[in-house]
Amino acid sequence: MLGTFAVGKTSLIRRYVRGVFDEKYLTTMGAKVDKKNVRVADVGVDLLLWDLNGEDRFQALSMEYARGAAGYLLVIDRTRPATLEAAHALQQKVLHAVGPLPFIVLVNKSDLPGHWDRQPGDLDALRAGGWVFVETSARTGTGVDEAFMSLASRLID
């Protein structure tokens, strides 16, 4: 899980692995690992979910963790447009550090009022470059299973 601070990485993992949501903001210190076993097309997949600190000063450390990854989820906060640019920078860092890996972009906090301040065409270039976007809400669970299973499916392809 990669993304800047407070985009909901920890909440998404808690929702996916445990089925719970906590209103309290919990800052991740360093890295936290969870595991979930899933089946994709009759293949068992063990997902080791690394929740990495989103503070900018820890991003170099995050790239060290990325070296062993088979894929990743980039998380952005639809209420904070700057998190898309941060995700793009993180994706470029991963690409530089370990090469191309399967990834999915989670547009989190879809349950919050307001609209995502992007025009549909704004994301076309990213989609053309292989970016897959899934709207999620850690609070309601919307899109969470779909996002993780989409990544798991890409990992076995």
Image (cartoon, rainbow, N blue to C red):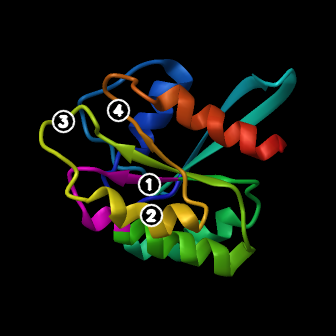
Q: Image quadrant of residue 139?
A: top left
Q: What element carries label 3?
A: loop
Mark 4 and mark 3 residues within 8 Å of each other at the beta carbon: no
Which sits earlier in the primary sequence, circle 1 or circle 4?
Answer: 1
Residue where numbered disc 1 is placed: 29
- Relative side of 60 to 48, left or right: left
| Circle number at residue 54 | none
Classify residue 75 as left or right of residue 145: left
Out of 15 and 77, give the one closest to the viewer.
77
Q: Is residue 82 magenta?
A: yes
The amino acid pointed to by label 2 is Asp
Residue 115 visible in the shown view = yes
Residue at image location 48% in from the left, 30% down from the top: 144
- Residue at (73% x, 45% y) in the render: 154
Mark 3: which amino acid?
Leu
Residue 73 drawn above or below residue 57: above
- Indicate left or right for 149 with 68 as reference: left
Distance between mark 4 and mark 3 Cα atoms: 9 Å
Q: Label 1 vs label 3: CA separation?
A: 26 Å
Residue under label 3: 112
Distance CA(mark 2)–CA(mark 3): 24 Å
Which segment did they paint magenta? 74-84
Which is in the foreground here, disc 2 or disc 3?
2
Q: Earlier in the sequence, mark 1 or mark 2?
A: 1
Percent position (x, y) of residue 77? Answer: 30, 51
Residue topped by disc 2? 124
